[in-house]
Image: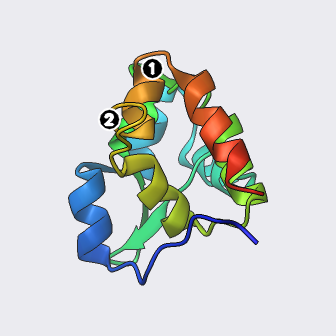
C-alpha cells in the first residue's frame, strides 16, 4: 500500500494544476508521430492523458520542444507500478513539492529527473 494518498480529483482541480492541454493530433505533430502512436504510448504507460469533452488530451508540459520531457516515460511507469491511476499520477506530477522545489514536472524540465524518480520509487513502499 502506498503512503501517498489523494482525495477525490475533479476535472477543475486537475485543469488548474496542469494548465494547457494538447489533443493527440497537437501532441503528435512536434514529435513527428501519428496520433495513434500517442495512443500507444498512453496504453504503454509511457504517457498519460484524460478525456475532456469526449476527446483524449495530454498535458502540454509533457513535451519539450520536439520530444517528450526527458525521463517522463520511466517516471510514469514508476507511478503506474506504485498503483497510481492516470489522474493521481498527473496530480502528483503537477503538485508543488517543497523538497524539490517546484513541481516534479518542472524539475524534469530542469534536468532534475533523477530526484523525481527517487521520489516516485519511494511511493511504492
Q: Which mark is residue 66?
A: 1
Residue 25 lies, with reference to residue 4, above or below; the image says: above
**What quarter of the picture does the N terminus occupy?**
bottom right
Q: Residue at 38% across / 19% down in the picture? A: 65
* CA neighbours of label 1 inside 10 A, class few (<14), some (14 to 19), many (20+): few
Q: Is residue 46 visible?
A: no
Residue 15 lies, with reference to residue 115, above or below; the image says: below
Q: Which residue is outermost to the top?
A: 111
Q: Position of residue 58 (x, y in %)?
A: 43, 52
Element type where label 1 sits in the image: loop
Element type where label 2 sits in the image: loop
The numbered mark, 1 or 2, whose residue comes first in the sequence reads 1
Q: Residue at 57% across / 40% down in the picture? A: 34
**What quarter of the picture does the C terminus occupy?**
bottom right
* CA neighbours of label 2 inside 10 A, class few (<14), some (14 to 19), many (20+): few
Q: Is residue 87 visible?
A: yes
Q: Residue at 64% across / 54% down in the picture? A: 42
Name the residue that disc number 2 marks. 102
Q: Position of residue 49 (x, y in %)?
A: 50, 59
Q: Position of residue 6 (x, y in %)?
A: 47, 73
Q: CA distance from mark 1 to mark 2?
A: 23 Å
Q: Quadrant of residue 2?
A: bottom right
Q: Position of residue 84 (x, y in %)?
A: 64, 65
Amino acid at each position: 500500500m502506498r503512503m501517498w494518498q489523494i482525495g477525490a480529483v475533479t476535472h477543475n482541480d486537475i485543469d488548474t494544476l496542469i494548465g494547457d492541454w494538447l489533443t493527440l493530433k497537437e501532441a503528435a505533430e512536434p514529435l513527428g508521430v501519428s496520433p495513434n502512436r500517442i495512443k500507444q504510448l498512453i496504453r504503454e504507460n509511457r504517457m498519460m492523458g484524460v478525456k475532456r469533452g469526449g476527446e483524449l488530451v495530454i498535458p502540454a508540459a509533457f513535451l519539450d520542444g520536439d520530444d517528450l520531457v526527458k525521463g517522463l516515460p520511466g517516471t510514469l511507469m514508476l507511478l503506474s507500478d506504485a498503483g497510481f491511476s492516470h489522474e493521481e499520477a498527473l496530480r502528483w506530477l503537477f503538485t508543488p513539492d517543497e523538497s524539490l522545489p517546484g513541481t516534479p514536472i518542472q524539475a524534469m524540465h530542469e534536468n532534475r529527473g533523477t530526484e523525481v524518480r527517487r521520489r516516485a520509487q519511494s511511493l511504492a513502499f
